[in-house]
């Protein structure tokens, strides 16, 4: 199959390099402004007007012009494979509709879980079983940071810079540390697993940017480990809750064993029970290999990751409650029914809360950027 590759950044370079060793995939064109070669063009029309190109791979990232190029490729009858979770989380509904109208593929397995074939497996499982919950540790950068802070006592800023230099972090790492990258991946997984396209603003999302050594110490002394977790759950009446937040897991929980930039993606089905996938969630080669897995699966006849019944939806967090570890600037007013007395005071007030509505915790803390909270999930 002759393909075109949009963007020769970290992942694009990986796709190009790995494709050289595959007998069935030829990268005929690369869309890129920065380099020159006979196979490189900076004009999308060169690719669109080449009748030999059957499939377009997008690894340029960002929303624009990725969205315009995706629309043009699909409208021209080309299959489209992308690793761009921002693109799919924002325009998945439109692009899937266009792909279905044109009868061409739209796959984005590498956009959630990096190198892990998580969405591909979830797509198959969803067709067989009723998925009841899904989620996991879906961001390599934040796991790298949290692991280093907790096991080596590393400094937050220094270890974030390391994650950037290793190619794990996004161009703007605030989307990693603020939980937005995880949120986008949860949107994709929920679309595949639950037939609902959620909007980013409807998912309560908190990252790890405010974590302090004080939080790490508290977790450690209580036999807990801090992880940034995504979770979406379907209740018996079909409503789906969804959120992204730091979570304190028991030190013997599977999440606690996920170290460095590794991801842990799971789903639960009525028949399957709990199925979990562990592997490289970020980085050049694993992600590029997963992109090429999607390319091959187009050749094998696979077309879409969501079902025909997948529609836009709003998560219902009305009944979601959680017991939290909460650290706020001293004197911050906290609803009386949330907490007893602080368990630590000084510059910060630290609480272990009663069960608190998840959406309310996120909403109240949205303006208190220095606060840190984490759902407590003891074994
Ligand atoms: N910045 C992302 C991460 C890259 O750290 O997981 C893979 O999506």
Image (cartoon, helix red, strand yellow):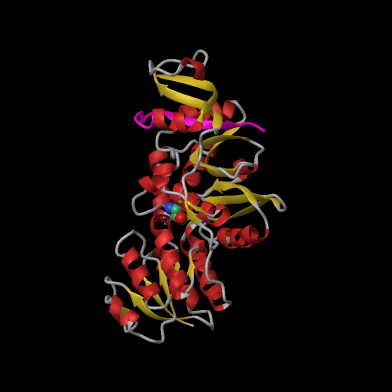
Give the residue drawn at x 50%, y 45%: 143
Residue 195, compared with residue 155, is above or below; it is below
Position of residue 51 in the picture relative to residue 134 (left or right) = left
Residue 344, compared with residue 132, is above or below; it is above
Residue 40 visible in the displayed image: yes
Give the residue drawn at x 54%, y 36%: 247
Give the residue drawn at x 63%, y 31%: 378
Residue 167: horizontal and vertical position, in percent? 42, 57
- Residue at far right of view: 271
Residue 211: horizontal and vertical position, in percent? 44, 33
Q: Nearer the viewer, residue 156 or 48?
A: 48
Residue 160 visible in the displayed image: no
Give the quadrant of residue 9: bottom left
The C terminus lies in quadrant: top right
Give the residue drawn at x 58%, y 63%: 120
- Residue at far top of view: 341
Please tell me how many numbered marks the rendered image carries. 0
Q: Nearer the viewer, residue 161 or 42?
A: 42
Residue 8, compared with residue 345, is above or below; it is below
- Residue at far bottom of view: 51
Position of residue 245 in the picture relative to residue 48 (left or right) = right
Residue 333: horizontal and vertical position, in percent? 39, 17
Q: Nearer the viewer, residue 71 or 287?
A: 71
Residue 126: horizontal and vertical position, in percent? 62, 58
Residue 53 belongs to the span the image colors magenta: no
Boundaries of the magenta span? 365-379
Residue 377 belongs to the span the image colors magenta: yes
Position of residue 261 in the picture relative to residue 128 (left or right) = left
């Amino acid at each position: 199959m002759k393909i075109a590759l949009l963007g020769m950044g970290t992942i694009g370079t990986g796709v190009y390099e790995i494709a050289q060793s595959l007998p069935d995939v030829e990268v005929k064109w690369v869309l890129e402004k920065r380099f020159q070669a006979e196979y490189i063009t900076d004009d999308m029309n060169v690719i669109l007007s080449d009748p030999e190109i059957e499939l377009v791979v997008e690894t340029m990232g960002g929303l624009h012009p990725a969205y315009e190029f995706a629309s043009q490729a699909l409208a021209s009858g080309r299959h489209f494979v992308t690793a761009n979770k921002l693109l799919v989380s924002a325009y998945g509904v439109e692009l899937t509709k266009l792909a279905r109208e044109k009868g061409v593929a739209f796959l984005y397995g590498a956009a959630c879980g990096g190198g892990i074939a998580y969405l591909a497996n979830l797509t198959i499982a969803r067709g067989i079983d009723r998925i009841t919950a899904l989620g996991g540790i879906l961001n390599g950068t934040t796991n790298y940071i949290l692991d280093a802070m907790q096991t080596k006592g590393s400094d937050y800023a220094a270890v974030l810079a390391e994650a950037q230099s290793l190619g794990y972090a996004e161009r703007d790492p605030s989307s990693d540390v603020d939980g937005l990258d995880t949120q986008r991946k949860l949107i994709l997984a929920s679309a595949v697993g639950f037939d609902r396209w959620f909007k980013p603003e409807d998912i309560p999302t908190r990252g790890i940017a405010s974590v302090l050594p004080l939080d790490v110490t508290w977790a450690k002394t209580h036999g807990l480990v801090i992880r940034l977790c995504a979770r979406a759950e379907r209740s018996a009446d079909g409503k789906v809750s969804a959120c992204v937040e730091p979570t304190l897991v028991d030190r013997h929980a599977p999440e606690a064993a996920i170290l460095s930039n590794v991801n842990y993606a799971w789903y639960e089905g009525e028949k399957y029970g709990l199925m979990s996938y562990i592997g490289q969630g970020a980085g050049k080669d694993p992600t590029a290999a997963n992109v090429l897995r999607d390319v091959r699966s187009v050749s094998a006849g696979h077309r879409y990751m969501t079902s025909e019944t997948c529609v836009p939806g709003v998560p219902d967090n009305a009944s979601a409650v959680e017991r939290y570890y909460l650290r706020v600037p001293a004197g911050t007013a906290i609803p009386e029914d949330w907490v007893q007395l602080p368990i630590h005071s000084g510059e910060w007030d630290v609480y272990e809360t009663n069960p608190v509505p998840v959406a309310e915790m996120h909403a109240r803390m949205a303006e208190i950027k220095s606060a840190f909270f984490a759902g407590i999930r003891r074994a």
